[in-house]
Image (cartoon, grey):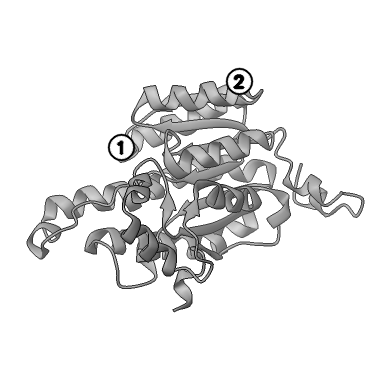
Amino acid sequence: MGRDDVRRDDMSYMEGFDLTGRCAVITGGGSGIGKGCALMLAQAGASVLVVGRRMGKLKEVQREILEKGGICECFSADLTNEESCKDMVAYAVEKFGRVDILINSAGSRGAHGSLEEEFSMENYRETMDADFASTFMAIKYAYPECAKNGVGSIINIASLAALRASGPIVYSAAKGAVRSFSRVLAKRLGPEGVRVNTIYPGFIVTEMTEKIHEMPEQEAKMKADSPLGLLGDIKDIAYCALYLSSDASRFVTGQDFIVDGGAMCG
């Protein structure tokens, strides 16, 4: 299906969210937001390749998808290594014959402490590699495949730290780089039939942050930051990713999607 095909006047509204026949590669797919996106896109009909360091976690996601009738493969990779990124895309093509969607969810917050710790060159290299270079290299090898069918979508998971003065120094800079990179790519890859958008999650309850429920005062403070009085759920990000992966967003590229319950309102 090409770009012109999704303009059919007879297409029902919900058909725009159908990902049947498409392949999604999701980095950081073994847990958290990446796992949520994998489950969501598989339910929408996509064949999913979940990518991460820990094969055990990836297999758990695969098992959950297969039990629900979905299609999923696993690929263990160090995404800070260029050959691994190249092999990841090649594996997806080998298994599914195509790549239409890339969701870059892998990353690391790096050092978060004293200025001395955060200014260490080791922290700089490790954090930039994990949070920017991995995205750069994954897109480098995925976008030619995404362009082949005219319905490509690249979704980068950034952070509110890219938009405001918060978070670790290098992490914030890396996510800021992802933001600029995404906007330039949207312009460059649009003529190739590939859309590029960025999601900025607010506080999302994941396996890493669920202990917030054991800290009533902190939980209340986090809820108070949102005009909605809510904490974010993984599905809140996954629904946004589904929209951006699908033909429902065929006229959307180069955009920033802040999913934070309104915390950035002020």
Q: Pointer 2: residues within 10 angstroms few (<14), some, or many (20+)?
A: few
- Residue on which the image places disc 2: 67
Residue occupying image coordinates x 64% and y 26% = 70
Q: Farthest residue toward the bottom?
A: 266
**Picture coordinates of residue 64 (x, y %)?**
54, 25
Kind of residue at disc 1: Asn
For residue 213, side relative to residue 185 (left or right): left
Residue occupying image coordinates x 35% and y 65% = 161
Q: Quadrant of the C terminus?
A: bottom left
**Picture coordinates of residue 57 (x, y %)?**
40, 27
Q: In the rendered view, tell whether residue 19 sits above or below residue 133.
A: above
Kind of residue at disc 2: Glu
**Picture coordinates of residue 207 (x, y %)?**
38, 40
Marks 2 and 1, how far apart at CA: 32 Å
**Picture coordinates of residue 71 (x, y %)?**
62, 25
Q: In the rendered view, tell whether residue 143 sits above or below residue 223.
A: above
Secondary structure state at the residue bearing disc 2: helix
Image quarter for residue 180?
bottom left
Which mark, by number, is residue 81?
A: 1
Sequence-first disc among 2 and 1: 2
Callouts 2 and 1 close, C-beta under 8 Å: no
Q: Farthest residue toward the left?
A: 116
Q: Quadrant of the N terminus?
A: top right
Secondary structure state at the residue bearing disc 1: loop
Q: Is residue 45 visible?
A: yes
Q: Pointer 1: residues within 10 angstroms few (<14), some, or many (20+)?
A: some
